[in-house]
């Protein structure tokens, strides 16, 4: 495919997204009908779509509208390319610009347009004067970080082995287990270091939060284990026996093979087994949240989020904390985590729990933002009476 044909394909995918099809589904649907597209074409189309979703408000201003075509035109302008060289109408390229489209270019748009307006006060409350830098960052792709499984390799050994497979990665002094991938990110999952469990993708902010907690020896329950990212990190980092639970057990399907790769043991605990297995010395609640800390990675999420959804998430978070607290041993720890930047999901949620649970004490908390680590991430440690 020519570069212009890739833009044409991205326009179709964006139109499908605008009609309500999730981005991944829209990309899959396009891919099924595009047998001629090679892996580089597919990657380029995906990148166009996600670049638009990261900067949708700016693209709409620069492209003069909200259709897939206008958004892609805006992206071409935002990236400093010449639209006339892309919108040629030749082959599978999009049709030439109309006079109106050619004139639509205006001043550089405000990055505030690239997040839902009602979230701006919450973002500002988190980063203060850093808001312009945060919003500018949201327009760009997030870096990829790996966590080195220290039971398998040192950080230096993992970096050297990744390099053999064309993945360049450098240690990050902000976390002892972190490698930042500086080139070859798409090759990580095919690399021997990944297949042999030396590395797992995990954001820097998560690695910092996990390392900041004083985890007890004994028994730790990951109550919202999902794919198991935190449970695996805990099994590698601590000497504790790690258990994993999730309200939707199918989400934990990858946990066993990932644990086997990493050479660690994580024990599944279905709902029926929870009460009998309690109490635990620590219970981690990595709760469902807005994901506002990961909007660079999942920009579609910011356009899906509505105030009602945020309120519902807060109720879910409070309910999970209430239930999980009952599983903590006397004097044990409840560790609350979100990948949200919003206080209502973080500090306010902790305050609400403490107000309703006399005797529990806060033992420290931390909030990362894309300005301090990579993703936004929050953690708080609460001590049981
Ligand atoms: C943020 S994700 C967890 C990500 C995971 N810890 C990781 O590191 O990959 C939140 C998880 O909470 C689960 N969940 C939602 N409601 C729950 C509940 N009431 N009890 C337990 N888990 C719940 C979801 O199924 C989802 O897998």
Image (cartoon, grey):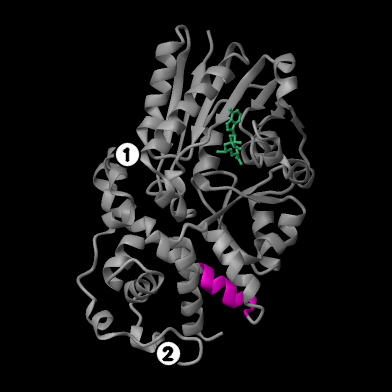
Badge 2 is on which residue?
Answer: 89
Quadrant (top left, top right, bottom left, bottom right) of the N terminus: bottom right
Cα–Cα gap, marks 1 and 2: 46 Å
Residue extending farthest to the front is 19
Magenta segment: does it hold 43? Answer: yes
Q: How many marks can you see?
A: 2
Q: Nearer the viewer, residue 31 or 168?
A: 31
Residue at 38 percent of width and 42 percent of height: 306
Could you tell me residue 359's position as x and y percent?
47, 7
Q: Bounds of the magenta span?
A: 37-46
Badge 1 is on which residue?
Answer: 126
Task: Assess disc 1: are there few (<14), some (14-19) or many (≥20) residues with their C-alpha within 10 Å of its C-alpha.
Answer: some
Question: Which secondary structure dominates the residues rendered in magenta?
Answer: helix
Could you tell me residue 270's position as x and y percent?
73, 27
Residue at 57 percent of width and 18 percent of height: 323
Question: Which of label 1 and label 2 is nearer to you?
Answer: 2
Asked if the residue at tag 2 contacts the one at tag 1, i.e. Cβ–Cβ closer than 8 Å, the answer is: no
Q: Is mark 1 within 8 Å of ligand 1?
A: no
Task: Assess disc 2: are there few (<14), some (14-19) or many (≥20) residues with their C-alpha within 10 Å of its C-alpha.
Answer: some
Magenta segment: does it hold 225? Answer: no
Q: Is residue 315 above or below residue 124?
A: above
Q: Is residue 239 visible?
A: no
Figure quadrant, ligand 1: top right
Horizontal relation, residue 113 to residue 186: left or right: left
Assign a secondary structure to mark 2.
loop
In the figure, residue 114 lies in which quadrant?
Answer: bottom left
Assign a secondary structure to mark 1.
helix
Residue at 24 percent of width and 76 percent of height: 105
In the figure, residue 150 lies in which quadrant?
Answer: top right
């Amino acid at each position: 495919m020519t570069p212009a044909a890739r833009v044409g394909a991205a326009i179709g995918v964006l139109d499908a997204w605008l009609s309500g099809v999730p981005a991944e589904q829209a990309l899959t649907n396009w891919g099924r009908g595009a047998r001629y597209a090679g892996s580089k074409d597919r990657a380029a189309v995906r990148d166009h779509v996600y670049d638009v979703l990261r900067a949708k408000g700016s693209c709409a201003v620069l492209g003069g509208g909200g259709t897939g075509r206008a958004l892609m035109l805006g992206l071409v302008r935002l990236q400093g390319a010449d639209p006339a060289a892309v919108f040629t109408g030749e082959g599978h390229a999009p049709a030439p610009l109309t006079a109106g489209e050619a004139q639509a270019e205006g001043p550089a748009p405000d990055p505030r347009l690239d997040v839902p307006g009602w979230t701006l006060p919450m973002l500002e409350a988190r980063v203060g004067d850093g808001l312009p830098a945060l919003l500018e960052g949201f327009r760009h792709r997030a870096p990829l970080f790996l966590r080195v499984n220290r039971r398998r390799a040192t950080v230096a050994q993992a970096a050297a082995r990744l390099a053999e497979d064309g993945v360049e990665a450098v240690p990050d002094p902000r976390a002892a287990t972190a490698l930042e991938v500086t080139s070859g990110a798409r090759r990580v999952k095919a690399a021997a270091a990944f297949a042999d469990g030396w590395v797992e993708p995990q954001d820097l902010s998560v690695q910092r939060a996990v390392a900041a907690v004083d985890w007890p020896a004994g028994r730790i329950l990951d109550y919202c284990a999902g794919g198991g990212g935190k449970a695996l990190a805990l099994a590698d980092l601590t000497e504790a026996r790690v258990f994993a639970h999730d309200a939707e057990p199918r989400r934990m399907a990858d946990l066993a093979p990932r644990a086997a790769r990493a050479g660690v043991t994580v024990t599944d605990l279905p709902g029926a087994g929870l009460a009998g297995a309690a109490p635990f010395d620590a219970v981690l609640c990595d709760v469902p949240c807005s994901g506002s800390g990961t909007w660079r990675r999942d920009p579609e999420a910011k356009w899906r989020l509505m105030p009602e959804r945020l309120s519902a998430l807060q109720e879910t978070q409070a309910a999970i904390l209430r239930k999980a607290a009952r599983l903590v041993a006397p004097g044990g720890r409840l560790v609350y985590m979100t990948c949200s930047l919003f206080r209502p999901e973080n500090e306010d949620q902790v305050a609400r729990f403490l107000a309703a649970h006399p005797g529990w004490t806060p033992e420290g908390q931390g909030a990362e933002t894309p300005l301090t680590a990579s993703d936004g991430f929050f953690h708080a440690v609460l001590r049981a009476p």
